[in-house]
Image (cartoon, helix red, strand yellow):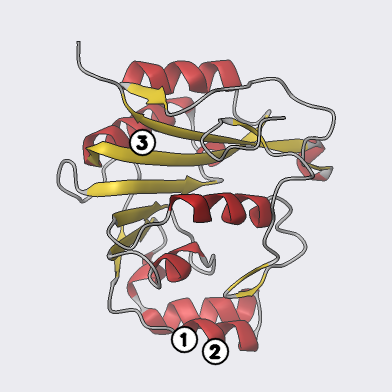
């Protein structure tokens, strides 16, 4: 299995993982240790980034704010607009210590918005990197098409779209078509084969996690 971070493929059990990202990750977050470890390959201090459908308690947006130039994070949940509500949700969902660890971090570079992925409130070509981690499996096909179109619109010409999603909840050939038809191309090699050592959970009937890194294809 190719190990270069720019290869789009399923996560496998010997991939790098992080069991802590600001706080210790819950065991139930079966794919997140691998996803977050992979995401760290795409962080630059010079970039303006988006954590799309960031969730309330998930730590990626807070981690990014410690390294990236500017971090935008949006979610459909209105609590994203209240720092107190965010911290309370972390305390309830993860624990009081985790909430304190997030609360003590600098957040001057972090900008929250309540938003639907199908209509992002950002100008064209706003971002150097867009992260969308374990989200697309929650969208209908029609909304996924619109969301990917919004990623294309708001990503700059040299930017990267960093995606993960659950399989088979997301139909891989279908999602591939959506991404390519939106105007994206894979940054590096692709391997759509499901390997025997793919990271797996038995929850929800059995799931694996696919990662993809894309950029805008050159205009014809």
Is residue 35 positioned above or below 152 on the image? below
* Alpha-carbon span between mark 3 and mark 2: 33 Å
Is residue 92 positioned above or below 69 on the image? below
Is residue 30 positioned above or below 63 on the image? above
**Can you tell which mark lies on residue 100?**
2
* Alpha-carbon span between mark 1 and mark 3: 30 Å
- Horizontal arrangement in the rendering, residue 60 relative to residue 35 (left or right): left
Query: Crowding at label 1, few (<14), some or many (≥20) Cα neighbours within 10 Å?
Result: some
Q: Which residue is mark 3?
A: 147
Q: Which residue is mark 1?
A: 103
* Alpha-carbon span between mark 2 and mark 1: 5 Å
Q: Nearer the viewer, residue 98 or 80?
A: 98
Nearer the viewer's eye, disc 3 or disc 2? 2
- Horizontal arrangement in the rendering, residue 8 relative to residue 219 (left or right): right
Q: Nearer the viewer, residue 175 or 143?
A: 175
- Residue at image location 34% in from the left, 64% down from the top: 68
CB under 8 Å between callouts 2 and 1? yes
Query: Crowding at label 3, few (<14), some or many (≥20) Cα neighbours within 10 Å?
Result: many
- For residue 107, which quarter of the picture? bottom left
Tell me residue 193's x, y (percent). 70, 20
Tell me residue 105's x, y (percent). 43, 84
Quadrant where the image shows the C terminus: top left
Tell me residue 203's x, y (percent). 80, 45
């Amino acid at each position: 299995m190719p190990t270069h971070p720019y290869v789009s493929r399923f996560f496998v059990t010997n991939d790098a993982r992080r069991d802590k990202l600001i706080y210790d990750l819950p065991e139930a977050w079966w794919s997140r240790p691998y996803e977050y470890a992979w995401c760290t390959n795409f962080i630059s201090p010079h970039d303006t980034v988006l954590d799309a459908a960031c969730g309330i308690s998930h730590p990626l947006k807070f981690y990014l704010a410690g390294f990236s130039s500017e971090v935008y994070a949006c979610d459909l949940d209105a609590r994203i607009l209240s720092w107190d509500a965010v911290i309370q949700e972390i305390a309830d969902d993860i624990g009081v210590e985790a909430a304190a660890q997030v609360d003590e971090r600098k957040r001057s570079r972090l900008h929250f918005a309540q938003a639907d992925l199908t209509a992002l409130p950002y100008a064209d070509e706003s971002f150097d990197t867009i992260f969308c981690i374990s989200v697309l499996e929650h969208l209908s096909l029609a909304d996924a098409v619109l969301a990917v179109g919004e990623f294309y619109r708001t990503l700059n010409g040299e930017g990267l779209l960093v995606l993960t999603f659950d399989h088979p909840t997301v139909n891989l050939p279908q999602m591939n078509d959506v991404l390519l038809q939106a105007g994206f191309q894979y940054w590096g090699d692709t391997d759509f084969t499901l390997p025997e050592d793919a990271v797996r959970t038995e929850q929800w009937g059995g799931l694996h996690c696919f990662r993809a890194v894309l950029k805008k294809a050159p205009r014809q």
